[in-house]
Image (spheres, helix red, strand yellow):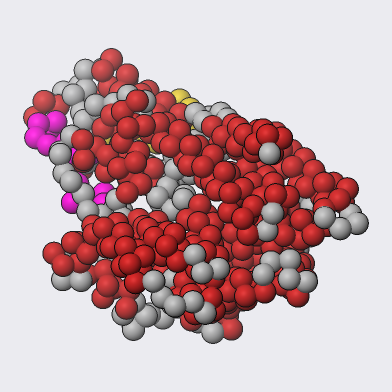
Amino acid sequence: MKKFSLILVAIVVVGLFLRIYHYQEWFMYSHDQDLLGWFIKDILVNHHIRLIGQETSQHGVFIGPLFYYLNIPFYLLANWSPLGGNFLVALLGGFGVWSFWYVFERIIGKFAAFSGAVFYAVSYSLVLSDREVVPTMPVVIWSVWFLYAVYLLLNGKQKLGWLLSGLLLGLVWHLNMGLLLISPLVIFAFVLSRKKISVKPLMAGLFIAFIFALPFILFEVRHGFQQTNAILFSGLHSEVVTGIEKFDRVIQLVSKNVYRIFLAEVIPLTHIHSLLITLGIMLFVSFKKIIRFKLSLLMWLWVVIYMFFFTYNPIVISEYYLNGLNVIWILFISAFLSFLYHTRWPATALVLLSIFVVINLYRFSGHVVDRSGYIDRKGIIQLIKADAEANNYPCVSLSYITSPGYELGYRYITWRENLKTKAVSDGAPVYTIVFPHSLVDKIDRSVGALGLIYPEYDKYTDISLETICSGEDLNTAYPLFGYTE
């Protein structure tokens, strides 16, 4: 037991290290992280108790505020710097490593627990996903505990099973509403357990779900069930393709996720072949009953529900919508390695796991930063502020030469640097941020991949900037995409 405890501690430490390593240089700061800072500013400066987070890609639907509140102490400890959020996700990642060990050990055994913890701790794809500091980051952790809730109910352990189910379902809105898709699995697990229902644990679970879902309920009552209507009727006027073409899109994204998790885009195997191999391993594990057959059946249903829903739902999907499936792939691959370890091929299991670790550590060693992240954005705004102060400009205008969307992600940094801004049309000195440099023939300064073009100074020598710069700061006055008061 002591040996395995030390191994677990070592894996957790590795997981923490990979999630915090070069946390400044690798911090890819963009619109989502800008929104996070803006929400925290609203809570701490404006004393606004928020019921919602940012608007999701589905119009009229928001994410819950829990992740934003969790970030507050880390922002304060980092002197209001967004870098503080890196420490929150690192700690959550460490908890996730322990979670995989704890849950897999009870479902399968110690070697599966060891394998699952290693996969989550070291996978280049999963680590980089965790490091993005976004509200959906804990989805994989939620999924592994939901798996445990299903396992508990399937085994007749209703007291903890219903309590855990209630907690997790109450948290769905705060992470990703798509997780509601698999909520029926707890009912199916209970039915398959063939146990008489325990009313008190069920009611306790429902009460916990109500408490954690209370911000959602209050917001819906106050705003005429806006989000509920948006979710239920999202497809009525949609022209997004469904059917075979959409199914192919879902398959491609699922395959891509599987390939990235286990092969780290190093081994020359197609995405679809990696998925077919994984499905073959799942079939082997199911029929060999390495995982209890009823639980395997529910895990297959988990996959089918995701595939069916996103095939026929008109929402435009990307990889992160399918992150709720990652725990299934890790579970079955871990079960397969456990089978190898406990039969005639223990060395094979260890070699395969070792290859996985080496491949992923190799990816980390060669990680390339595109130099447009937080440090570089902060540096470019500081350059602008320093030049504005040197020229006695009480305010500036910010202009962008870049692709649509890349002009976002500067608002919180600009506010934090106390740089007052005005619209370009107001006549304030215009500083132009360029990304990438190749879009223009000449830049005056650069910070990483970001270029800066200084104003034409002669234009502002004979005008009254005090008049132009009077009034409100454009940065705090005009709407921020995805942000709602």
Most prominent secondary structure in the magenta stretch?
loop
Q: In screen coordinates, is 318 left or right of 337?
A: left
Residue depicted at 25% across the width and 54% down the height: 52
Tell me, yes or no, if residue 423 can be seen here.
Answer: yes
How many dots with numbers? 0
Residue depicted at 51% across the width and 69% down the height: 156
Residue 245 versus residue 277 in the image, above or below? below
Residue 349 versus residue 239 in the image, above or below? above
Residue depicted at 41% across the width and 81% down the height: 239
Q: In screen coordinates, is 440 left or right of 471?
A: right
Residue 210 versus residue 237 in the image, above or below? above
The span picked out in magenta is 468-485
Is 80 or 113 nearer to us in this picture? 113
Q: Where does residue 72 sit, x and y in percent of width and height?
A: 31, 36
Is 97 or 42 nearer to us in this picture? 97
Tell me, yes or no, if residue 431 can be seen here.
Answer: no
Is 285 or 410 nearer to us in this picture? 285
Q: Where does residue 5 sit, x and y in percent of width and height?
A: 65, 36
Q: Where does residue 15 sit, x and y in percent of width and height?
A: 60, 38
